[in-house]
Image (tube, rainbow, N blue to C red):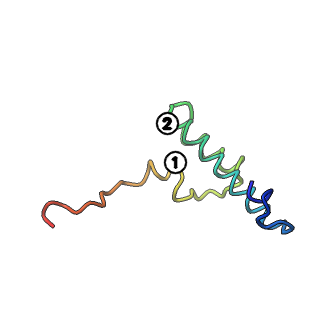
Amino acid sequence: MMYERGLGTGDPEKHIGQLTDALLRDVRLLSAIGMHTGGMTVAQSEKMFSTQAFQTQAMPVNSPLAARLTPHTSTTPSASS
């Protein structure tokens, strides 16, 4: 949508970059919904990232799968601090 509004108009590399980012956001959304509703396995999610979003085997840090595998830590100070 930003390309249509004039951002990067005339630069095909910027347009491809915007489309690639949009595609990755779409796949992340579909993966998150599929995994959280139980309709998609981790293997299916990984396959979707590689075949639909053209991502390498390495999982992006902010993907739904990475969020499940990364231990969450509190950012609030402990009572003893």
Residue toward you, 36 or 25: 25
Residue sticking out furthest to the right? 10
- Where does residue 19 sit, x and y in percent of width and height? 75, 56
Identify the disc placed on residue 36: 2
Identify which amino acid the numbered label 2 is placed on.
His
Foreground residue among 47 and 52: 52
**Gap in Å between the C-alphas at discs 2 and 1?**
9 Å
Residue 18, given in percent of the width and then of the height, sits at: 73, 59
- 67 lies left or right of 43: left
Query: Is disc 2 in contact with disc 1, using a CB cutoff of under 8 Å?
Result: yes
**Residue that label 1 marks:** 64
Q: Which residue shows up at 59% across the image and 43% down it?
A: 29
Give x and y (percent) for residue 23. 70, 50
Q: Residues within 10 Å of mark 1 (few under 14, many from 20)?
A: many
Is residue 55 placed above or below 35 in the rendered structure? below
Q: Amino acid at mark 1?
A: Pro
